[in-house]
Image: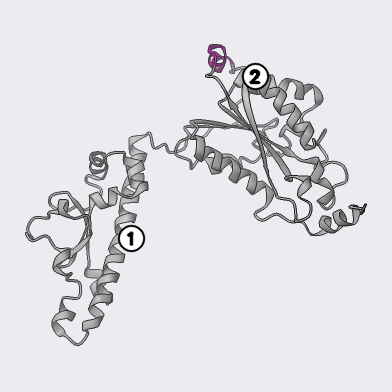
Amino acid sequence: MMDKKPKEEQFRKIITFTPPLYKQRYEFIKDLVGKYKPKKVADLGCADCTLLWMLKFCSCIEVLTGLDICASVMKENIIEHLEESELKEFPEVVFGFMAPSIVVISTPNSEFNPLLPGVMLFRHPDHKFEWNREQFQSWALETARHYDYSVEFTGVGHPPTGMENLGFCTQIGVFVRKYPQTSESAQSENTTGTVYKTVFKAVYPSLKDEKYLQIAVVNEVIFTAETMKQSLLGQLMSEHEEYNDDPIERKSKFQPSVNFFSEDIGKLVVEKSMEPFVNGNLVYIPLKRIFSFPRVNQLCGTFDRLCKLIAGKVTLSSDGSAVVFSTEHENEEN
């Protein structure tokens, strides 16, 4: 049999993760949030709140909570930092008392340690223990069985070619509650006042607030319409470059073909077309086309709501069916 030690020593000097391992863990959680769309998320061992900062931009989340053992910025409060006595109580607190719909636990895979430079026993001097895959899965399966959760195992940080048998650098267990929250667990939210100390609270602009929603919608509409305007003008400029020697064509540089007009210039009939068009020195971007963009659609929900939110905040056509831009500035530049 070949001695695997030299191979491990070789990998110990060169192994790196791209992106860094901590970013892979954060992205794993972010993807999970995108999949399940929870309204409340708690990060146990939040350290410098980097994960919370990332998740606050997820529109489905209404409440973000970070918990750590110390008010100062720390990175020592994930499961392997618990004392043995605390570890025994951990499942009861998280799965029994808090009883969330989903629990994600990440922990080092001790089998991977021989590949990491500078690691003698544990990856962090404050670690009380580090589990191999069998140990973690045994604990997780028993916990899931006891508290009526299912659990799936995965991880981040792939091993190098030839060492796949070691598994992921960080092992992850995703627990999903099988049954609805019990009345006892639901009532427990009212009894936590004396258990934890609030050291900092921040209320971020919420899209449930009409004022902040309007700002978000107006900004998105203007950005989308401006992008479409530039695309249209660029297309028209390309078409008219073919007629540079024709003074009539040069004079009507921003005049589109008949397909870009409604037949009645005094009244826009955008219902017949969702395409933007130019009329004289004005560019018209139909609201229905803007509403078809996923981001705008998700923010507003309905077309009527879109019209209500941008009323008085965006320049519209006389019948309110399109966002209007002037091409005078473009004409001067060209």
Mark found first going from the N terminus, 2 or 1? 2
Q: Which SS class for mark 2?
A: loop
The chief SS type of the magenta part is: helix
Label 2 Cα neighbours within 10 Å, binned few <14 / some 14-19 / many ≥20: some
Q: Is residue 332 above or below residue 211?
A: below
Q: Is residue 184 magenta?
A: yes
Q: Quadrant of the C terminus?
A: bottom left
Q: Is residue 2 left or right of residue 292?
A: right
- Which mark, by number, is residue 147? 2
Q: Is residue 81 visible?
A: no
Q: Position of residue 51 (x, y in %)?
A: 59, 41
Q: Which residue is more in the foreground, 313 or 298?
A: 298
Q: Amino acid at mark 1?
A: Thr
**Image height of 30 relative to 259, above or below:** above
Q: Is residue 91 left or right of residue 298?
A: right
Residue 188, compared with residue 66, is above or below; it is above
Q: Nearer the viewer, residue 2 or 197?
A: 2
Q: State yes or no: residue 67 in magenta.
A: no
Per the rendered image, the range of residues in magenta is 182-191
Q: Secondary structure at mark 1?
A: helix
Task: Give the residue drawn at x 64%, y 48%.
Answer: 24
> Decide: marks 2, 1 in contact (CB < 8 A)?
no
Q: Residues within 10 Å of mark 1 (few under 14, many from 20)?
A: few
Question: Which residue is label 1 attached to?
Answer: 227
Give the residue displayed 85% in from the left and 53% down from the top. Answer: 8
